Image: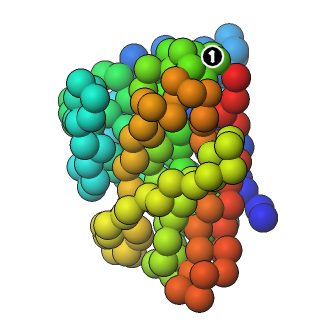
Amino acid sequence: MKRRTKRGLAAGAVALVALVGAGAILGSQLGSSTPPDIVALNKAVQSAPMTRIADIPAAGGLPERGVFVQVTSTGEVCLWDAVTATSRGRMGGCDDASDPLGGSKVSASLAYDGGPATPDVKDARLIGLVDPSVATVRVVMSDGSSRSVQFGSSKIQGRTYGVFGYRFRHSDLVKGVGPVAVVATDASGAEVGRQPTGFGG
């Protein structure tokens, strides 16, 4: 399955980027020499409007969060996990607006607070987009079980995508059970997309 790099933010199938200040993080991930296109993306991310397209409900004393989308002037679609549209603390990534799924049927970002060992994670969340042909999304866990992820729909650049925000149960995390892969299936139950989370510890 072909996947592109999430430009200037994170590489691989599942991205984790914590934006305290977009410039600081984008620059630090690339070292001291920042390519001009990344500088432009950095500025675009700071100025593009954020639209809330899904919710991550409050649970276990943890606050509600939102899934936000940005379409930047540099031709990127960025998906963020944040408390509010004005929050300076965001987690997520960007892909080319012509193909926000990066050549797959599912594009997801995992974010977590705490760790690195799974029992030390205080909060773990998953956000993402899926192709309209996807009927179900589930997360395969490290103990072999799976968690069903509900999703709604949203129009981005005139095209409809499934969109989700999911918070993992703290009871799983304290037992050392963490997310291994995100799996998308079609209406027949056939797997059409899979991304490893990169989560471990």
In the image, residue 33 lies at what x, y percent? 69, 16
Q: Quadrant of residue 189?
A: bottom right
Hey, which quadrant is residue 105 in on the image?
bottom right
**Callout 1, which amino acid?**
Pro
Task: Give the quadrant of the N terminus.
Answer: bottom right
Q: Which residue is drawn at 43% across and 30% down?
A: 170
Whether residue 43 is visible here, answered yes or no, is no
- Could you say which is closer to the camera, residue 73 or residue 155? 155
Visible in this render: residue 130?
A: yes
**Residue 51 appears left or right of 72:** left
Q: Name which residue lies at 60% across and 42% down.
A: 179
Of 7 and 19, the residue lying toward us: 19
Q: Where is residue 186 in the image (x, y as percent from the top left)?
A: 57, 81
Colour convention: rainbow
Crowdedness of circle 1 by 10 Å Cα count: few (<14), some, many (20+)? few
Q: As drawn, is 122 to the left or to the right of 1? A: left
| Local SS, label 1 | loop
- In the orientation shown, which residue stands out farthest toward the right? 1
Q: In this view, does 43 lie above or below 191?
A: above
The foreground one among 35 and 9 is 9
Residue occupying the point 59% across, 68% down: 184
Image quarter where the C terminus lies is top right
Q: In this view, does 2 lie above or below 112?
A: below
Q: Is residue 57 rendered to the left or right of residue 118?
A: left
Position of 82 relative to 12 (above/below): above
Residue at 61 percent across and 27 percent down: it is 176
Q: Which of 78 and 176 is in front in this view?
A: 176
Q: Where is residue 121 in the image (x, y as percent from the top left)?
A: 51, 20
Provide the residue designation for mark 1. Answer: 116
Furthest-bottom residue in this view: 188
